[in-house]
Image (tube, helix red, strand yellow):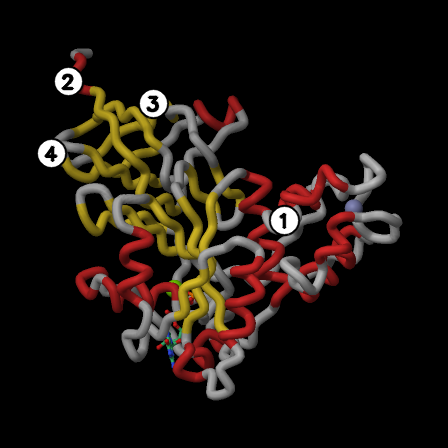
């Protein structure tokens, strides 16, 4: 077999054991064989891979090797991303702050940058989004408020995603696909109304897919999630997943302080100042184990 039969590329989609791999020679549909299952590693969207070409004309091949990942998320499943754009809405669907916190905690735990996008601000007559935005800005997150329907805030988001691989993640129906369509109409992603989603069992986007919108900008659309867990994160480690706690963690009286009921706690002293009360109260609830979502 000649060298020319091996290509490198990136998995852009994986459905039913078939992986679509974008290469310099076009898109190949590949199978994984048993190779990876034996090693306990399965290929996911975003993986850089080596492909053994089976048939160039038919653009088919086998995945030969997965190149080392810089990072990965378990839900939605994706690898080698520069940032997560966590999309939420205030009113339709109603915001679930435990889901927002939980997802940001997972990103911090995995060492993945995250920005928050509050979409459908056109529906938020009371402008509650301003307060939500402020609470997450205090936590050191960039917050981008958008309306895919009205075209608000989209340029800011475009700039934040330029030159990077970003995944849009968030509950079903918040408008992840709508935002991508508004920014890049050529994508023509399927979007669904909330009532259709309920009838169809929620998700309009059913598979995670990586979309190349320019030479160096990649966007990942993903199916909405309904719930997930942070219970795998050690309770003592949870404090490290709060960027706004970081400046104070060394200043508590007890070195093993978890900032709940200890006295002389530097974190607690900042609550209501530069630590948002809501974020802190939810943190306390997660630490005491009631983090079911
Ligand atoms: N009013 C308003 N509606 C929006 C906005 N963005 C999206 N929608 C609507 O919200 C509904 C859901 O949008 P989708 O883009 O399918 O949501 P999604 O997050 O991709 O959902 P899943 O693929 O199921 O995870 C559609 O009816 C959109 O037209 C917005 O900014 N304002
Ligand atoms: Mg979608
Ligand atoms: Zn403390």
Residue in the picture at 56% in, 59% down: 138
Nearer-the-camera pick, 173 or 52: 173
For ligand 1, which image quadrant applies? bottom left
Quadrant hosting residue 281: bottom right
- In the picture of the structure, the residue carrying the numbered disc 2 is 4
- Badge 3: how crowded within 10 Å, few (<14), some, or many (20+)? many
Q: Nearer the viewer, mark 2 or mark 4?
A: 2
Q: Which badge, 2 or 3, comes first in the chain's sequence?
A: 2
Query: Residue 279: where, in percent of width, then height?
Result: 66, 61
**Numbered circles on residues, count:** 4
Query: Residue 67: where, in percent of width, then height?
Result: 37, 24
Q: Which badge, 1 or 3, comes first in the chain's sequence?
A: 3
As helix, strand or loop, the secondary structure at mark 1 comes to: loop
Q: Is 19 placed above or below 91 here?
A: above
Separation of marks 3 and 4 at Cα, in angstroms: 19 Å
Q: Nearer the viewer, mark 4 or mark 1?
A: 1
Q: Is 59 placed above or below 266 here?
A: above
Q: Which badge, 2 or 4, comes first in the chain's sequence?
A: 2
Residue in the picture at 16% in, 12% down: 2
- Badge 2: how crowded within 10 Å, few (<14), some, or many (20+)? few
Residue in the picture at 46% in, 35% down: 71
Q: Which badge, 4 or 1, comes first in the chain's sequence?
A: 4
Residue in the picture at 33% in, 66% down: 179
Q: Is residue 223 left or right of residue 26?
A: right
Separation of marks 1 and 2 at Cα, in angstroms: 48 Å
Separation of marks 2 and 4 at Cα, in angstroms: 14 Å
Q: Is 135 placed above or below 162 here?
A: below
- In the picture of the structure, the residue carrying the numbered disc 3 is 64
- In the picture of the structure, the residue carrying the numbered disc 1 is 242
């Amino acid at each position: 077999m000649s060298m020319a039969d091996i290509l490198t590329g990136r998995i852009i989609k994986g459905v039913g054991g078939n992986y679509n791999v974008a290469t310099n020679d076009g898109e190949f549909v590949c199978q994984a064989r048993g190779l990876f299952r034996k090693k306990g590693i399965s290929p996911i969207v975003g993986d850089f891979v080596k492909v053994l070409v089976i048939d160039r004309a038919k653009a088919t091949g086998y995945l030969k090797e997965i190149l080392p990942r810089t990072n990965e998320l378990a839900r939605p499943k994706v690898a080698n991303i520069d940032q997560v754009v966590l999309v939420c809405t205030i009113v339709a669907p109603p915001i679930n702050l435990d889901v927002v916190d939980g997802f940001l905690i997972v990103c911090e735990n995995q060492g993945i940058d995250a920005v928050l996008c509050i979409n459908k601000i056109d529906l938020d007559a009371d402008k509650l989004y301003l307060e939500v935005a402020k609470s997450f800005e205090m936590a050191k997150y960039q917050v981008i408020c958008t309306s895919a329907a009205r075209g608000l805030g989209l340029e800011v988001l475009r700039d934040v995603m330029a030159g990077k691989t970003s995944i849009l993640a968030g509950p079903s129906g918040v408008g992840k696909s709508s935002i991508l369509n508004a920014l890049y109409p050529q994508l023509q992603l399927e979007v669904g109304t909330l009532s259709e989603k309920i009838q169809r069992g929620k998700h309009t986007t059913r598979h995670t897919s990586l979309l190349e919108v320019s030479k160096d900008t990649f966007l990942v659309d993903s199916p909405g999630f309904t719930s997930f867990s942070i219970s795998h994160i050690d309770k003592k480690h949870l404090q490290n997943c709060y960027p706004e706690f970081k400046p104070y963690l060394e200043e508590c009286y007890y070195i093993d302080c978890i900032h709940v009921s200890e006295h002389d706690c530097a974190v607690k002293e900042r609550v209501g100042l530069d630590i948002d009360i809501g974020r802190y109260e939810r943190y306390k609830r997660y630490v005491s184990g009631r983090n079911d979502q």
